[in-house]
Amino acid sequence: MTYPPGHGYPPPPPQPYSQNSGVPGAYSPPSKNSSALKWVLLAVVVVIALVVAAGAVFYLSRDRGATEASQIKSGDCLSEIPDSSRVLYVKTVSCDQPHKGEVFAVLPLPDGEFPGDTAVIKYTDKCAPALDQYAPNVTADSAIQLFVLYPTADSWQRGDRTVTCIATSKNPRTGKIE
């Protein structure tokens, strides 16, 4: 077979791209690893952003000066009485400041399995005698009412084992009940 002059041989077949051909400025396609790395980095950034956003929501939604309901103790005064059956935080104040409630007893429940709502609510009956012991003269005051915080099946799973008895008044009062 003869070839036209100046073309001695047929052109070589196409060659695959090489990573580093040694030719400056030579094009090489992006590696598959760099594309996967970009997706992993993007996923990490998204997860971090979600964690920061969740933390900000929790921080901003929590009332400053609030105390975990499971951490209050006898003698603490509450600026407001919770209006929900599921209470996570309460705002405690000095009893010298106007307040609407005073914790007079924190009654521990026995450990073990959750005894059920009926048994826990029955246990709250111990609050009235505890109030008589804490402040014997207050039972004659019709402005004082009882409010009770008690564990639910959910809070029991988190370790809540106390019935918290609170003497409340419709109008704010100052000082301890007597």
Image (cartoon, grey):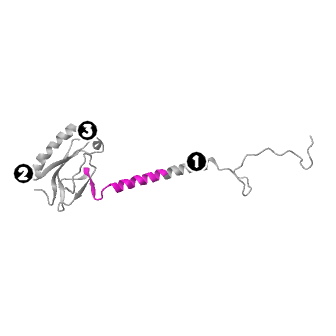
Region in magenta: 46-70
Residue 173 x %, y %: 15, 59
Residue 97 x %, y %: 19, 62
Count of number-bearing discs: 3
Task: Determine whether 177 is above or below 163 in the image.
Answer: below
Kindly state the secondary structure of the residue where label 3 is placed. loop
Task: Determine whether 125 is above or below 69 in the image.
Answer: above
Residue at 42%, 54% (x, y): give it.
52
Question: Separation of disc 3 and disc 1 at Cα?
Answer: 49 Å
Residue 40 x %, y %: 54, 49
**Which residue is label 3 attached to?**
114
Amino acid tagged 1: Ala
Can residue 49 be found in the magenta stretch? Answer: yes
Q: Earlier in the sequence, mark 3 or mark 2?
A: 3
Report the magenta stretch's main SS.
Answer: helix
**Which residue is label 1 attached to?**
36
In front here: 157 or 3?
Answer: 3
In front here: 105 or 138?
Answer: 138
Amino acid tagged 2: Ala
Disc 2 packing (10 Å; few <14; some 14–19; many ≥20): few
Amino acid tagged 3: Phe
